[in-house]
Amino acid sequence: MVKIDLNKVEREFGYLKIGNKHYELIINRDSDGLQKFVEIKDYDKRLALAKELTQKLKKNLDKEKIMMEVLMKSKNLKMLQDLKKELTKKSTKPKTRRHHCVDMKVGKFILPIVE
């Protein structure tokens, strides 16, 4: 068994990054549910292609439709009202974040955009 320093493990676009290598978690659902990490050997090619496609597609991205969808999925009206108060504060700066999902942090609120 290989020991991994968890302080050196990062997440990048849904993959685990350890050093210069990227891994995907595979769960064996057929038998015993064992988990294993499989190295993504063509990660750099995938990343380059994803960047190229992103540049071509982002021109047609409708940000308003995405944000309206995200906000309409909120739990209740009170949450939206609290979010509005947070946005009116001068110290609040919304920031798009990427982790296991893409979200936007607005003060104490986290709006999931892509899960």
Image (cartoon, grey):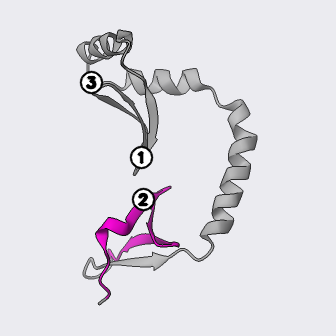
Cα distance between the residues tagged 3 and 1: 19 Å
Q: Nearer the viewer, mark 2 or mark 3?
A: 2
Amino acid bearing label 1:
Cys
Magenta span contains residue 21: yes
Question: What separation in Å lies between label 2 and label 3 (alpha carbons)?
Answer: 28 Å
Quadrant of the image for the N terminus?
bottom left
- Please name the amino acid that badge 2 sits on: Arg
Residue at the limit of the structure toward the front, as seen here: 91
Answer whether residue 49 is magenta in the image.
Answer: no
Q: Earlier in the sequence, mark 2 or mark 1?
A: 2
Q: Distance between the residues labelled 2 and 1?
A: 11 Å
SS for dot 3: loop
Give the position of the C terminus as an image quadrant. Answer: top left
Per the image, the residue denoted by label 3 is 75
Horizontally, residue 108 falls left or right of residue 12, namely: left
With respect to residue 64, does 9 lie above or below? Answer: below
Q: Who's the residue at 72% across and 43% down the image?
A: 55
Q: Name the residue under label 1.
A: 101
Q: Dot 2: within a 10 Å radius of its alpha carbon, few (fewer than 14), some, or many (20 or more) residues?
A: some
